[in-house]
Image (spheres, rainbow, N blue to C red):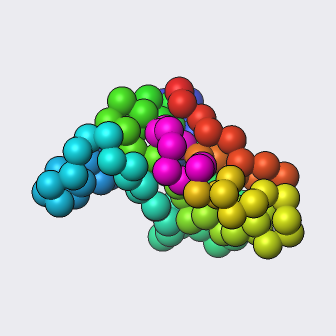
Amino acid sequence: MAGVGYVFSVSREQVNQADSHRERAGLDATFPSILIINTNIKNARSLDEKDKPVAPDQVRHAKHLGILVLRTLDLLRLLGLYKRGTITRDEVLRLLTTGAGWLRVTDERAQRVES
């Protein structure tokens, strides 16, 4: 898909680095790990331009390594869902500590993408 003119937001190296940080900290590969990334930081002039998907191959790679990818926009939207009462504190904690892949958050809901 990247060759079709799509701009993706997360690189394989960034996912690998999150895994390396966990390993250097002496934590087991099953320890919940989150990669929070500020997408398209240099080129974006608006939030819409920053709202780029995580490439499916990077989502699969993160899932394989047990890493949860969360774009800064997803994190802010997750906070918005919580503040509006759409999701509870326990739901936020469950979303952040279980599963891997990409936690895609819109203004309406949070959804884990695994491929």
- Magenta-span inclusion, residue 101: yes
Residue 90 vs residue 114, the one in the foreground:
90
Residue 50 visible somewhere in the drawing:
no
- Magenta-span inclusion, residue 108: no
Which quadrant of the view contains residue 85? Answer: bottom right
Which quadrant of the view contains residue 45? Answer: bottom right
Residue 62 vs residue 95, the one in the foreground:
95
Residue 3 at x, y percent in the picture: 48, 30
- Residue at 26% over, 41% down: 29
Q: Is residue 110 left or right of residue 102?
A: right
- In this picture, is 81 found above or below 29? below
Residue 64 vs residue 30, the one in the foreground:
30
Residue 94 visible somewhere in the drawing:
yes
Residue 34 at x, y percent in the picture: 42, 55
The number of numbered badges drawn on the structure is: 0
- Residue at 21% over, 52% down: 27
Residue 92 at x, y percent in the picture: 64, 57
- In this picture, is 41 found above or below 28? below
- Residue at 15% over, 55% down: 26
Q: Which residues are magenta?
A: 94-102
